[in-house]
């Protein structure tokens, strides 16, 4: 699995990007943002399963926006793929994350998945 630094989306628009991933044996990519004009839980690009990201932990600065994105994901029936950076998660951020997840769990049916399991989970739906 790979997620390129800073999600440099222009890399993922080039065929050679996926060729390079496959050459290195990487079959799961998480380097693009969810496109809610065409929401997909995952898609296959040149043999690589792509699971788009919806938000980062920085969204917790704006609780309303975080909830909006989670609700949008639920309506679109795609994973609310939240990318977390451990170096950005101190005690307050972890507490905010717990609070956020508690709210999400009261509003939606939640299933926690590893990225590696997204394709098989959504293929059976």
Image (cartoon, rainbow, N blue to C red):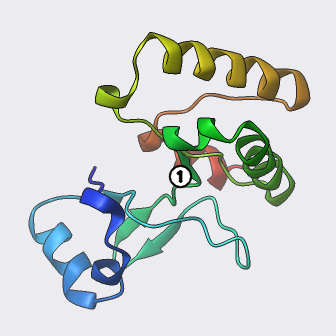
Q: SS at mark 1?
A: helix
Name the residue at 28% across, 49% down: 1
Mark 1 residue crowding within 10 angstroms, few (<14) / some (14–19) / many (20+): some
Q: Nearer the viewer, residue 62 or 67?
A: 62
Q: Quadrant of residue 64?
A: top right
Where does residue 14 sit, x and y in percent of width and height? Answer: 28, 89
User: Does residue 59 sit above or below 104 in this rendering?
Assistant: below
Where does residue 30 sit, x and y in percent of width and height? Answer: 39, 57
Q: Name the side, left or right, on which 114 lies relative to 69.
A: left
Q: Name the side, left or right, on which 54 lies relative to 116.
A: right
Q: Quadrant of residue 107?
A: top right
Name the residue at 65% across, 66% down: 40
User: Does residue 96 sit above or below 72 in this rendering?
Assistant: above
Residue 58 in sight here: yes
Q: Name the side, left or right, on which 42 lies relative to 44.
A: right
User: Does residue 31 sit above or below 58 in this rendering?
Assistant: below
Q: Nearer the viewer, residue 96 or 35?
A: 96
Q: Nearer the viewer, residue 65 or 114?
A: 65
Q: Name the side, left or right, on which 76 lies relative to 92.
A: right
Residue highlighted by disc 1: 119
Q: Quadrant of residue 105?
A: top right
């Amino acid at each position: 699995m790979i997620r390129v630094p800073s999600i440099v989306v222009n890399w993922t628009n080039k065929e050679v990007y996926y060729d390079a991933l496959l050459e290195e044996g990487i079959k799961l990519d998480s380097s693009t943002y969810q496109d809610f004009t065409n929401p997909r839980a995952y898609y296959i690009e040149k043999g690589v399963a792509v699971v788009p990201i919806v938000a980062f932990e920085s969204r917790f600065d704006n609780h309303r926006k975080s909830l909006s994105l989670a609700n949008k994901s639920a309506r679109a029936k795609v994973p609310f793929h939240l990318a977390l950076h451990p170096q950005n998660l101190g005690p307050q951020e972890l507490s905010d994350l717990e609070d956020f997840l508690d709210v999400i769990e009261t509003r939606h049916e939640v299933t926690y998945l590893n990225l590696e399991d997204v394709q098989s989970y959504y293929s059976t739906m």
